[in-house]
Image (spheres, rainbow, N blue to C red):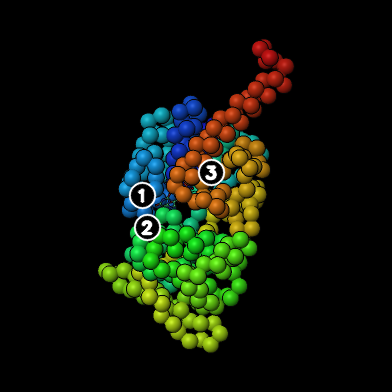
Amino acid sequence: MTAHAKVVIIGGGPAAYTAALYAARAGLEPVCFEGFNSGGQIARSGRLDNYPGLPGINGADLGSTIRDQATEYGATFEFSDVFEIELGSTPFRLTGMDGEHTADVVIVATGAASRKLGLPSEEALDGKGVAYCAICDGPVFAGKSVVVVGGGDAAVGEALALRHVVGKVTLVHRRTAFRAGAVLRAALAAATDIEVVTPAVVEDILGVEAGGVTGVRVRMVDDGTLRDLDAEGVFVAIGHEPASQLFQPWLKCDGSGFIITEPGTTATNVPGVFAAGDVADPRYRQAVTAAASGCQAAIDAERYLVGRDFLTAATDPSHPTI
Ligand SMILES: Cc1cc2nc3c(=O)[nH]c(=O)nc-3n(C[C@H](O)[C@H](O)[C@H](O)COP(=O)(O)OP(=O)(O)OC[C@H]3O[C@@H](n4cnc5c(N)ncnc54)[C@H](O)[C@@H]3O)c2cc1C
């Protein structure tokens, strides 16, 4: 039999768990498909130093605490990915490990993943000097040399921000021209304390698992020579992949796949479908902003349902009270 829920939340990170908490407290009895890799990106972080009120909290503990809070108020969790979804008509239909479900409202909170260079050394040294978020991990490298890799807004913005936090910043980009916007490019040109190495491709990240990163080997595109840059940290800032493929037949996304929401809300182009967290956020991508937009999505969902029920009653001639 197909199970029906007023609100289905898809995702297993701070956005989904917070949406579940707020929807549960609103009496909407949400069902959250938290995925096989539940916990979200923060589960990879041993320690968060910027989640307000919880200094130094372990990332996995933060996720499970919000999840427990939501469970206490009646949210239920399915340890399954959503494999298929149909958002073309209501009720919306989706398929998890245990079969088909329907929902009046869907909140998409499937997150994003940092793009990787694809080097074995990057994998081996992930979290041991290789990082993907300057706001999150910059202070770990206070006084040290770091290399930032990339040429877009994220890379140039991170390089500019990091120079106030770390000892030395080198920016490596495979092209001579940067894709970053004009303001960031101008700020970079004026930042004499950032060494720019272009056009150069990262060949290897140097270091040992026990001791961490010691440098970055780049190949200069112009003449093919190899150059080793000293660094104790590497910030890979070559973009993010939002987990939006499943929804793209219905939901408007930007050129990078981030779901587009109505400014100031979590509403997508499909009434009754809301998007929260990194999957709809090309700009901030923080645990606290993901959690905050999960809260917004649950409130938007509740208001949508109230409005829909009111309109249904208003247009139903058999309804006695309207
Ligand atoms: C190593 C690392 C360290 C970080 N450190 C910090 C930090 O110190 N401070 C900070 O504020 N932020 C930090 N961040 C960023 C922060 O983790 C993210 O901004 C935040 O987790 C985004 O939350 P989210 O809920 O939107 O998505 P995510 O955390 O990406 O969670 C999405 C979840 O949805 C699941 N999912 C995807 N598709 C499906 C599907 N079809 N069905 C069901 N489930 C699905 C995924 O498996 C995942 O569990 C860090 C990120 C990383 C990678």
Query: Amino acid under label 1?
Result: Asp
Query: Looking at the image, which residue sits at the far left?
Result: 210
Query: Amino acid under label 2?
Result: Pro
230 is higher (above) or lower (below) than 285: below
Q: As drawn, is 205 to the left or to the right of 181?
A: left
Answer yes or no: is residue 55 visible: yes
Q: Bin the neighbour count of mark 1 within 10 Å (Cα to Cα): few under 14, some 14-19, many 20 and up.
A: some
Which comes sooner in the sequence, label 1 or label 2? 1
Identify which residue, 296 or 163, lies in the foreground: 163
Compute the Cα span from label 1 to label 2: 10 Å
The number of callouts visible is: 3
220 is higher (above) or lower (below) than 189: below
Q: As drawn, is 129 to the left or to the right of 182?
A: left
Compute the Cα span from label 3 to label 2: 27 Å
- In percent of the image, x 61 and y 31: which residue is there? 304
Identify which residue, 83 or 112, lies in the foreground: 112
- In percent of the image, x 64 and y 26: which residue is there? 307
Q: Nearer the viewer, mark 3 or mark 2?
A: 2
109 is higher (above) or lower (below) than 21: below
Report the residue marked by disc 3: 276
- The circle on residue 49 is 1
- The circle on residue 305 is none
- Classify mark 2: helix, strand or loop: helix
Q: What is the quadrant of residue 268 in the picture?
A: top right
Compute the Cα span from label 1 to label 3: 22 Å
- In percent of the image, x 64 and y 54: which residue is there? 254
Residues under numbered marks 3 and 2 in contact, where contact means CB atoms less than 8 Å apart: no
- The circle on residue 139 is 2
Query: Amino acid under label 3?
Result: Ala
Q: Nearer the viewer, mark 1 or mark 2?
A: 2
Establish whether ligand 1 lies closer than 8 Å to the Cβ of label 1: yes
Answer yes or no: is residue 237 visible: no
